[in-house]
Amino acid sequence: MSTIKNPSQKKRLSLERDRRNTYGENSKSSRKNIAKAKQRQHMDERRSVTHILGQLKGQADDDVVSQAELEVKLAIADSRNRGFKKVPDKPLGIVLARKGKKLN
């Protein structure tokens, strides 16, 4: 049971804490597309690493191996920088204010 008894304080807290999805797509599809986007990013990382390491053939010098290792780390960092980032939901108060609804 809520410890807040004042209705106006309850309303204010509700507008601050409750969240709404404003990303622009169906909330059910967001749930599935987040997993797909993460999967795409991981696949891209593995593909770039495989491409770089595939260029090493047979016995390789230490210099060539260290250069390939550096390229792999850079490729992974680049993939993560341009990769998927989740967008948090907006507070209910902001969503209703944008829609022009009366808040109180």
Image (cartoon, rainbow, N blue to C red):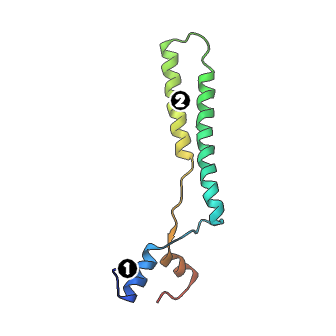
| Picture residue at 47% right of the left edge, 73% below the top | 18
Tell me the amino acid under the disc marked 2.
Answer: Val
The answer to whether 49 is drawn above or below residue 80 in the figure is above
In this figure, what is the number of numbered marks? 2
| Picture residue at 55% right of the left edge, 12% below the top | 60
Tell me the amino acid under the disc marked 1.
Answer: Ser
| Residue named by callout 2 | 72
Left/right placement of residue 12 relative to residue 61 reads: left
| Picture residue at 60% right of the left edge, 17% below the top | 56
**Residue 61 on image: x %, y %:** 51, 11
Q: Nearer the viewer, residue 64 or 6?
A: 6
Q: CA distance from mark 2 to mark 1?
A: 53 Å
**Residue 95 on image: x %, y %:** 53, 76
**Residue 73 on image: x %, y %:** 50, 32
Q: Secondary structure at mark 2?
A: helix
Query: Mark 2 or 1, which is nearer the eye?
Result: 1
| Residue named by callout 1 | 2
